[in-house]
Image (cartoon, rainbow, N blue to C red):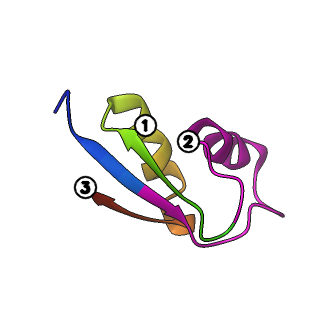
């Protein structure tokens, strides 16, 4: 699990969301709709992805 990566795409807007959910987007490095980032598969990143999974599309790389 240490070397795995996850591709994360933001599919819904951050506006009107809870401040903690917006902070998760910022922590993952997402700013725009349809922006894709590749992050390490760590428990911290998994927790942020799980919290805002309704706004994201993600897959293991």
Q: Is residue 2 left or right of residue 42?
A: left
Q: Could you tell me which quadrant the C terminus lies in?
A: bottom left
| Tag 1 and tag 2, C-beta contact below 8 Å | yes
Q: Is residue 16 left or right of residue 42?
A: right
Q: Residues within 10 Å of mark 3 (few under 14, many from 20)?
A: few
Coordinates of residue 8 in the picture (x, y in percent): 45, 57
39 shown above or below 37: above
Q: Which residue is mark 2?
A: 28
Q: Which residue is mark 3?
A: 60
The residue under the point 30% across, 38% down is 41
Q: Could you tell me which quadrant the N terminus lies in?
A: top left
Q: Which residue is mark 1?
A: 45
Frontmost of labels 3 and 1 is 3
The residue under the point 56% across, 42% down is 28
Q: Residues within 10 Å of mark 1 (few under 14, many from 20)?
A: some
Label 3: which secondary element? strand
Q: CA distance from mark 1 to mark 2?
A: 7 Å
Coordinates of residue 38 in the picture (x, y in percent): 42, 47
């Amino acid at each position: 699990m240490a070397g795995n990566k996850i591709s994360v795409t933001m599919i819904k807007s951050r506006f009107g969301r809870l401040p903690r959910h917006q902070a998760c987007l910022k922590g993952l490095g997402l700013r725009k709709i349809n922006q894709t980032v590749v992050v390490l598969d760590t428990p911290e990143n998994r927790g942020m992805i799980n919290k805002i999974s309704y706004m994201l599309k993600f897959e293991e790389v």
